[in-house]
């Protein structure tokens, strides 16, 4: 039997192996809810069925299939379902530029939304689908360009048929097909219905545009999401409303791993205004109410007898006596064993024989994510038993699969919506104890109505996963000319990836040592190693991950080596990079940007005594060089200027790059000067911004950016501008005060 299929529901219900006569037009329009006459390119559709997606993409290899849902509407506007999430970093705009360049459609005509879970949307060269690691643009660039080129080829073919001319005689201008010989043109929207019935061309047959002909790639195109965000029309999970929806708030146990014993005043809380019901959850209690404020007041009024964690606790329990300062001191005493990430030359031999040696111990602090958008999730069980979840996230497929595992539902019966995120910073990954969606799902099931759960700021600070803490012991050796000939760094730490796994892997967690390892300085003998120490704190990814701390350690110690050898740190770096043209050019560029390197101390025009520091970092495929200028005011550091030269190889949107550099510098300064998550008696000292200060506008530096396009393979941009900020500032402070900076934040120091 050959069954005719017109809709996704019919295909989903078809027995496996059944031959299919697929009505492509009706199937695509029904799948997308698209307007009649819309060109819908590709089978990467939000069908809600893994079988449908598998059936429609299995014949195509990864990287050559059309990976996203692209709809050209009758008015020639373009709707793109983006494989990546938008959280302020500009991915929607970059994707519109990349696809629009090859489609020949102005990015301003694009309407961009996040694509649903599905194999069709795995477009990165590494086979992953996450929005993180500064990977979205650089790892999908060729594939997304090809998507636009395929769509353009289909429109040209449709234009040839409508105009009755060979396709070779046609060209395009933004939004229309052109027949120059006759002076005729057809808007894309008029060709959509005809193009819909055409097969997608062989990806190998389309030719991508020469970069010299780019209209939009490489240009400061206006953000496609700017208008909605500036007018309050942008919708985040916290904004969504559904018919019949209830609101929920939670009170978590004061320490992770503790469980609910009893509720002493449940009856009184149930009688409070607006309260619908009271619920016990793993490690938390919740109140569901008609309004969130009612739920929050009620849950805070609950008097809970909390029980200590049992030996069979499913989460990493927090000890009652845990102190972050004491834990740091413990890491400083760890002796091993250590595993080497890098070991070149004869480090031990050179250190043993060297006349000039230097040793130093560095450490950093735990950090919260502290993003302005509080965690939230909205869950609704539909009458047919299917589940819909609205959730800010950085990995929709991972979250959909986790929801399926938790609920026992077939993934095909789960619809995950991914609204805009109010900031990334690594907060919206799959952290078992730090996400609200399991609670929202449980509450929606219990009450039989949609439930939107919002964590208060206090609950977020209580359950947020933290940026790791590390203690690094350095040893270095200098030759008779004062040049480094050996460097050793041994870090006592736990990386976020191994922390999430709950154990050390067969290989070293690269997120534990990145920024210590992978340095390009020509030091012949080097050893980078980790002493793995499993701690009680739940760890996660933080913007630029291991580089955010390890580049501080390495670059600050490199300045110590320079001082010990009587070398200028800028000139020393140039010497150590003399055989690396790309990094030499970058370092010279930041020097020029700053008006010429001068270390100081010197007296500025306002009479303040200032100094400068320099540092470099190589995270996520890009290269960065930073110079910072500082002074001391009232015993604390004031950063006046940050100059940053950044080389991401090639670029898509320079305006977005400049914005990302400014944002990364702000966060880099915040962690350098102020931010710190302190634990006392197993509890965070800060439950809100009053005890977790972030960088205020008055302490923000002027930021100067130079983009260097070396032509190397495209790198990331969201995270690379951050890591070199801390060491550049620390090196400037050390020069100004004579006090070596071996830890952050600098708020723990008092300078004179």
Image (cartoon, rainbow, N blue to C red):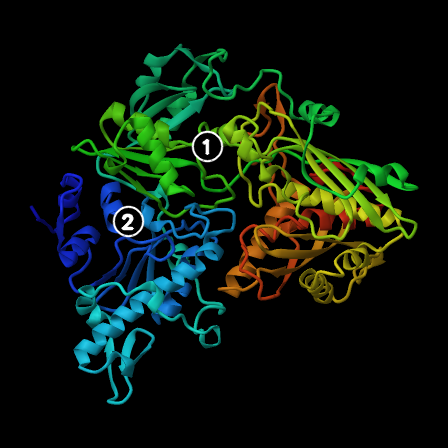
- 683 left or right, relative to 72: right
Does residue 633 show up?
Answer: no
x, y percent for residue 738: 86, 45
- 665 left or right, relative to 378: right
**Upstream in sequence: badge 1 or badge 2:** 2
Q: CA distance from mark 1 to mark 2?
A: 31 Å
Q: Nearer the viewer, residue 59 or 724?
A: 59
- Rendering quarter of residue 589: bottom right
Q: Residue at x 45, y 19 (%)?
A: 314
Q: Is residue 133 above or below residue 283?
A: below
Q: Residues within 10 Å of mark 2 (few under 14, many from 20)?
A: few
| Disc assigned to residue 431 | 1
- Rendering quarter of residue 181: bottom left
x, y percent for residue 229: 40, 55
| Disc assigned to residue 621 | none
- 189 left or right, relative to 663: left
Q: Is residue 449 above or below residue 196?
A: above
Label 1 secondary element = loop
x, y percent for residue 404: 31, 31
Label 2 secondary element = loop
Q: Which residue is mark 2?
A: 58
Does residue 412 show up?
Answer: yes
Q: Residue at x 41, y 42 (%)?
A: 395
């Amino acid at each position: 039997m050959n069954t005719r299929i017109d809709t996704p529901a019919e295909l989903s219900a078809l027995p496996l192996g059944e031959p299919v006569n697929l009505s492509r037009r009706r199937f695509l329009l029904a799948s997308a809810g698209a307007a009649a006459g819309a060109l819908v390119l590709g089978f990467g559709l939000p069908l809600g069925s893994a079988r449908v997606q598998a059936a429609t993409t299995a014949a195509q290899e990864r990287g050559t299939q059309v990976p996203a849902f692209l709809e050209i509407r009758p008015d020639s506007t373009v709707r793109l379902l983006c494989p990546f999430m938008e959280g302020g970093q500009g991915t929607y705009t970059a994707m519109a530029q990349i696809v629009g360049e090859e489609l020949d459609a102005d990015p301003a005509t694009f309407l961009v939304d996040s694509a649903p879970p599905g194999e069709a949307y795995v477009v990165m060269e590494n086979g992953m689908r996450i929005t993180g690691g500064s990977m979205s643009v650089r790892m999908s660039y060729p594939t997304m360009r090809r998507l636009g080129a395929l769509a353009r080829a289909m429109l040209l073919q449709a234009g040839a048929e409508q105009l009755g001319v060979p396709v070779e005689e046609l060209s395009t201008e933004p939004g229309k097909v052109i027949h120059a010989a006759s002076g005729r043109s057809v808007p894309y929207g008029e060709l959509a219905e005809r193009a819909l019935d055409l097969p997608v061309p062989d990806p190998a047959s389309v030719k991508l545009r020469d970069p010299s002909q780019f209209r939009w790639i490489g240009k400061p195109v206006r953000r496609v999401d700017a208008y909605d965000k500036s007018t309050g029309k942008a919708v985040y999970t916290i904004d969504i409303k559904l018919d019949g929806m209830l609101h929920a708030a939670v009170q978590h146990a004061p320490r992770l791993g503790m469980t609910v014993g009893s509720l002493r005043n449940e009856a009184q809380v149930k009688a409070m205004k607006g309260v619908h019901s009271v619920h016990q959850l793993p490690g938390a209690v919740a109140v569901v109410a008609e309004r969130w404020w009612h739920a929050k007041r009620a849950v805070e009024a609950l008097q809970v007898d909390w029980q200590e964690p049992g030996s069979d606790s499913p989460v990493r329990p927090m000890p009652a006596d845990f102190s972050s300062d004491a834990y740091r001191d413990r890491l400083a005493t760890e002796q091993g064993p250590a595993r080497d990430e890098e070991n070149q030359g004869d480090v031990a031999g050179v250190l043993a024989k060297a006349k000039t040696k230097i040793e130093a111990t560095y450490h950093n602090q735990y950090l919260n994510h502290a993003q302005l958008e509080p965690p939230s999730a909205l869950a609704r069980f539909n009458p047919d038993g299917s589940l819909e979840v609205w959730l800010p996230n950085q990995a929709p497929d991972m979250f959909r699969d986790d929801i399926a595992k938790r609920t026992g539902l077939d993934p095909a019966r789960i619809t995950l919506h991914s609204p805009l995120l109010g900031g990334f910073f690594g907060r919206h990954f799959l952290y078992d104890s730090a996400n609200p969606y399991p609670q929202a799902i449980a509450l929606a099931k219990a009450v039989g109505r949609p439930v939107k759960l919002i964590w208060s700021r206090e609950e977020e600070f209580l359950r947020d996963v933290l940026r790791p803490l590390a203690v690094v012991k350095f040893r270095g050796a200098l030759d008779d000319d004062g040049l480094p000939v050996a460097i050793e760094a041994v870090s006592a730490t736990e990386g976020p990836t191994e922390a999430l796994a709950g154990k050390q892997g067969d290989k070293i967690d690269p997120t534990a040592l990145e920024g210590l390892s992978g340095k390009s300085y020509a030091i012949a003998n080097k050893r980078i190693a980790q002493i793995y120490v499993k701690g009680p704190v739940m760890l996660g990814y933080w913007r630029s991950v291991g580089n955010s701390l390890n580049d501080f350690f390495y670059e600050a110690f490199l300045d110590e080596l320079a001082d010990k050898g009587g070398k200028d740190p800028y000139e020393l770096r140039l010497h150590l990079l003399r055989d690396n043209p790309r990094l030499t050019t970058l370092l010279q560029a930041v020097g020029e940007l700053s008006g010429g390197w001068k270390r100081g101390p010197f007296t500025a025009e306002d009479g303040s005594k200032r100094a400068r520091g320099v540092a470099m970092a190589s995270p996520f495929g890009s290269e960065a060089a930073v110079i910072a200028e500082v002074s001391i005011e009232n015993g604390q550091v004031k950063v006046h200027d940050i100059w940053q030269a950044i080389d991401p190889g090639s670029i898509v949107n320079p305006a977005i790059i400049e914005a990302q550099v400014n944002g990364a510098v702000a966060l880099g300064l915040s962690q350098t000067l102020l931010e710190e998550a302190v634990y006392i008696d197993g509890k965070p000292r800060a439950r809100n911004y009053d005890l977790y200060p972030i960088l205020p506008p008055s302490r923000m530096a002027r930021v100067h950016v130079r983009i260097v396009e070396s032509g190397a393979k495209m790198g990331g941009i969201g995270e690379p501008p951050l890591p070199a900020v801390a060491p550049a500032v620390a090196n400037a402070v050390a020069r100004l005060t004579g006090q070596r900076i071996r830890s952050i934040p600098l708020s723990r120091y008092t300078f004179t």
